[in-house]
Image (cartoon, grey):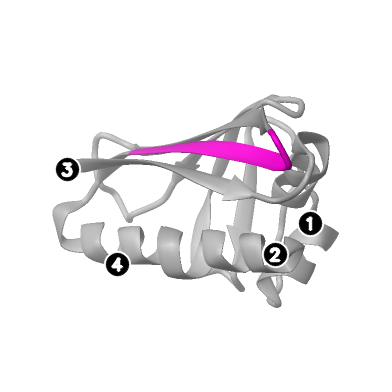
């Protein structure tokens, strides 16, 4: 199991970025694909037409999102924490993704950089 941590910058206000990450309709817009999201703990979610699935664990409005991402029956569970910070001209997102299965690590890192955050950043540029 491996961990991945990185900061991303989105050129939009923190409250808007938070809504983009937690509102189903907005996720559909920036991903260009179907999503299922309810910003409540202990709800299941799907992003990118089911390519990413898991369970929402914690929400701190406009500040933090914690999710469990599913990788079959892997233990320990894989946890994604997104912390949003105000920056000049936008929002810094601190990503920490823990317990990524070794065989999936490269694909997950590439997905964070080239798909997930690339689409979100591009949406606001």
> How would you rate the neighbour count of disc 2 (Cα within 10 Å): few for under 14, some for 14-19, many for 20 or more?
many
Q: Give residue 78's quadrant in the image.
A: top left
Q: Secondary structure at mark 4?
A: helix
- The numbered mark, 2 or 4, whose residue comes first in the sequence reads 2
The disc at residue 35 is 2
Structural distance between the alpha carbons of marks 3 and 1? 30 Å
Q: Residue furthest bottom?
A: 32
The disc at residue 107 is 4
Structural distance between the alpha carbons of marks 2 and 1? 6 Å
Residue segment shown in magenta: 88-97
Q: Give the percent coordinates (x, y) of residue 12.
A: 76, 47
Identified at 64% across, 61% down, the residue is 120
Majority secondary structure of the magenta segment? strand
Structural distance between the alpha carbons of marks 3 and 2? 27 Å
List the residue tagged with mark 1.
24
Q: Does the magenta-highlighted stretch encompass residue 90? A: yes
Q: Which-is-in-front pick, marks 4 and 1? A: 4
Structural distance between the alpha carbons of marks 4 and 1? 24 Å
Q: Are marks 2 and 1 in contact (CB under 8 Å)?
A: yes
Quadrant in which the C terminus is drawn: bottom right
């Amino acid at each position: 199991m491996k961990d991945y941590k990185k900061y991303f910058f989105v050129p939009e206000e923190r409250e808007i970025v938070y809504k983009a990450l937690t509102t189903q309709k907005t996720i559909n817009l920036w991903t260009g694909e179907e999503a299922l999201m309810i910003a409540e703990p202990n709800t299941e979610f799907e992003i990118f037409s089911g390519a990413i699935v898991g369970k929402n664990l914690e929400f701190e409005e406009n500040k933090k999102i914690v999710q469990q991402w599913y990788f079959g029956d892997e233990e320990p569970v894989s946890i994604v924490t997104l912390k949003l910070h105000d920056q000049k001209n936008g929002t810094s997102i601190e990503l920490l993704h823990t317990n990524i299965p070794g065989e999936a690590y490269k694909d997950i890192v590439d997905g964070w950089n080239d798909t997930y955050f690339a689409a979100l950043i591009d949406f606001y540029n």
